[in-house]
Image (tube, coloured by chain):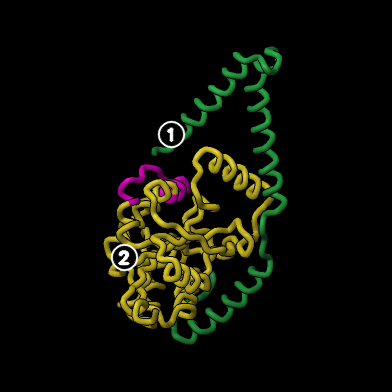
Chain colours: A yellow, B green
Amino acid sequence: MAEQQNKNKYSIIVPTYNERLNIALIVYLVFKHIPDINFEIIIVDDGSPDGTQDIVKQLQQVYGEDRVLLRPRPRKLGLGTAYIHGLKHATGNFVIIMDADLSHHPKYLPQFIKKKIETGASIVTGTRYVTGGGVHGWTLMRKLTSRGANVLAHTLLWPGVSDLTGSFRLYKKTVLEHIISSCVSKGYVFQMEMIVRASRKGYHIEEVPITFVDRVYGRGGKT
Amino acid sequence: MKHIVKIMTLLVAITAVWISLLQTAMIPPSYTWLLPLYLIISLGCYGLLMVGVGLMQFPTCPQEALLLQQDVIEAKEFLKHKGVDVGSD
């Protein structure tokens, strides 16, 4: 088991926009929770005006430029293309995608990795909707639309995963590259499309319960 | 098998059962004609029920917000110590 872990490298792709405080917190927490794993954090910043990239450069001084990679883009170009851009620079054989606003807590990273090693899955996705998972800071309306969309999507698509719109996932790098190339939608539908396509193509998908605390700091990319 | 094929097969199977019920007249025909309507209404009610149940059982985690705040304090202290600017935005 330990030998297997030494051969694996995890590229964590974090798309950012105006996350100058959150990105520092995320990087600290990642290093805190997976100190013995071979990983790199790839920050794809879309030209944030709040100085996010300066903070990343400071983090590089603390943690090393080989562990914290800054791969910026000139302006907001969309989430899907941010992943593709990050993938180009990823040197790991596994890729983890997560949000930069602390709604995805790095403390679940060891569980994702453990699940993958135990089951040999190609994709491990975080789910907020099972026991052990959960959300905080959601209004009743948000819960209603989430649950309604979930029931509708499950009735029509039979996806085989409980959380379709979640974006805290671990992919085998080759699998992610393959799926992304066949996706056509944008926004949060893109996340749904990725996991449904993966399910259709027959990839082994496992789930890990995660908790999702709604954004506390900043506004991020929401216009 | 592609997903759309699965759905179509299911619909064809249900339609076949419905037509055979009409033919054999085991159930009074007036009732049989309305069966698809009853099915759709039942499905709709089931869907609404699932949404309602899911809403009531929606897992929440208020304690996680507290843990997160603690993590944030710990992180800010460490990073300030190392010279990273963690003033709030």
Q: Residues within 10 Å of mark 1 (few under 14, many from 20)?
A: few
Work out whether residue A48 can be spotted.
Answer: no
Examine the image and state in which quarter residue A175 appears.
bottom left
The secondary structure making up most of the magenta span is: helix
Name the residue: 55% across, 26% down: B14
Name the residue: 33% across, 73% down: A9
Q: Nearer the viewer, residue B83 or A169?
A: A169
Magenta range: A179-195
Name the residue: 49% across, 41% down: A157
Name the residue: 37% across, 58% down: A46
**Callout 2–callout 1 Cβ contact below 8 Å:** no
Judge if badges 2 and 1 mark residues of a common chain. no
Q: What amino acid is labelled 1 in the image?
A: Ile
Left or right: where A84 falls relative to B81: left
Q: Nearer the viewer, residue B50 or B11?
A: B11
Q: Which numbered disc covers residue A134? A: none
The percent position of residue A194, horizontal first and vertical second, equals 41, 50
Query: Is A193 one of the magenta-colored residues?
Result: yes
Residue matched to label 1: B4
Which label sits in the foreground, 2 or 1?
1
Q: Chain of mark 2?
A: A
Q: Residues within 10 Å of mark 2 (few under 14, many from 20)?
A: some
Residue matched to label 2: A71
**On-image quarter of the N terminus of chain A:** bottom left
The percent position of residue A3, horizontal first and vertical second, equals 34, 81
Left or right: where A65 falls relative to A110: left
Q: What amino acid is labelled 2 in the image?
A: Arg
Work out whether residue A29 can be spotted.
Answer: yes
Against A48, is A41 above or below?
Answer: below
The percent position of residue B70, horizontal first and vertical second, equals 62, 77
Q: Gap in Å between the C-alphas at discs 2 and 1? A: 40 Å
